[in-house]
Image (cartoon, rainbow, N blue to C red):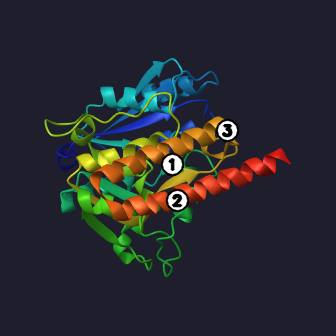
Amino acid sequence: MMKECSKPLVSIIVPVYQVKDYVGECVESLLRQIYTNLEILLVDDGSTDGSGEICDEYARRDNRIRVIHHENQGLSAARNAGLDRAMGEYVAFVDSDDAVLPVFIETLYDLAERYQADIAVCAYGRGEIKGTGTQIENDIRVANPFRDKKAGGTVDRYDYSKYDGSVTEVCMTSSQMLRQWHGRYKKWETVAWNKLYRKRILDGTDDSDAIRFPIGRRHEDVLTSHLIVANAGRIALTTQKLYMYRTREDSITTQVMTAEHRKQNLLAQRERMAFFRKRRYWRAYLNLLIGYVLHVGWFWWKREKERK
């Protein structure tokens, strides 16, 4: 216990909005972390479906949980509210309809410490998460591809060194990460929720500006991920799938794109491209330009299809 308490406090920020059917699974997965020196900030963004009450009940059960209630302002404002109140040396974001493996924080903390990295990143699984309560941990284990086939199940305490799956770790400087942006690791670069950050790179220093998520804008991760990396010294990445991303019909990412949504998407991409052009990261800029052109073509095709 003394050894665990000597580890730094990690703040996990969970924006919560209209997710009463899922938030319990999310919080349960956080409470099962083997890294226990945590504060879990549940930011209720004006939910009206009972999600906030569920958060309050969890706070009564575990003193590591704090609930922040405020009027609905969107995902960015909820994350910012959590950041402004976070007391940890490290910060992680988890969406309230997702779940994480019990070693999510422990593995990323170990990765950050071993490589002296400001950001530790993991791979993620995508799909529908089934079950409630203790069942959620079993479902996540089944979804995790790093399994001991001889034993027919997961290895005790998730000893990934015994898995037959190929696990890769990569460490890059901030400049190296930005130069290859949207390249080999593009699936894991932009999203905010598969990472552990040293909070100082989000709060800014004498040499860097504070990073907060843009309120009132869509694609907040696209607008901020490269800026956060620019504030970092090193970034370490593991191909272990420690985060389980839920796909559901009523989520933001699965909503039908309106003309305004498409406009916001392209605007966010242009702003990110401008950053890379200004920094002269030409390979990354070209990668982003190709993606932008493909998006323009896709949106045009979708618009024409909708008109017919």
- Residue furthest to the left: 206
Q: Neighbour class for label 3 at 10 Å: few (<14), some, many (≥20)? A: few
First-in-chain label (3 vs 1):
1
Q: 139 above or below 33?
A: below
- Residue 177 appears anywhere in the view: yes
The disc label shown at residue 291, or none: 2
What residue is drawn where x is 52% and y is 39%? 96
First-in-chain label (2 vs 1):
1
Residue topped by disc 1: 99
- Residue 123 appears anywhere in the view: no
Element marked by disc 3: helix
Determine which quarter of the picture holds residue 49: top right
- Residue furthest to the right: 308
Q: Which amino acid does label 3 sit on?
A: Ala
First-in-chain label (2 vs 3):
3
What residue is drawn where x is 51% and y is 41%? 267
Element marked by disc 1: strand
What residue is drawn where x is 42% and y is 69%? 184
Percent position of residue 197, x then y: 29, 46
Q: Distance between the residues labelled 2 and 1?
A: 29 Å
Element marked by disc 2: helix
Q: How far apart are marks 3 and 1 (CA)?
A: 32 Å
Percent position of residue 41, x then y: 39, 31
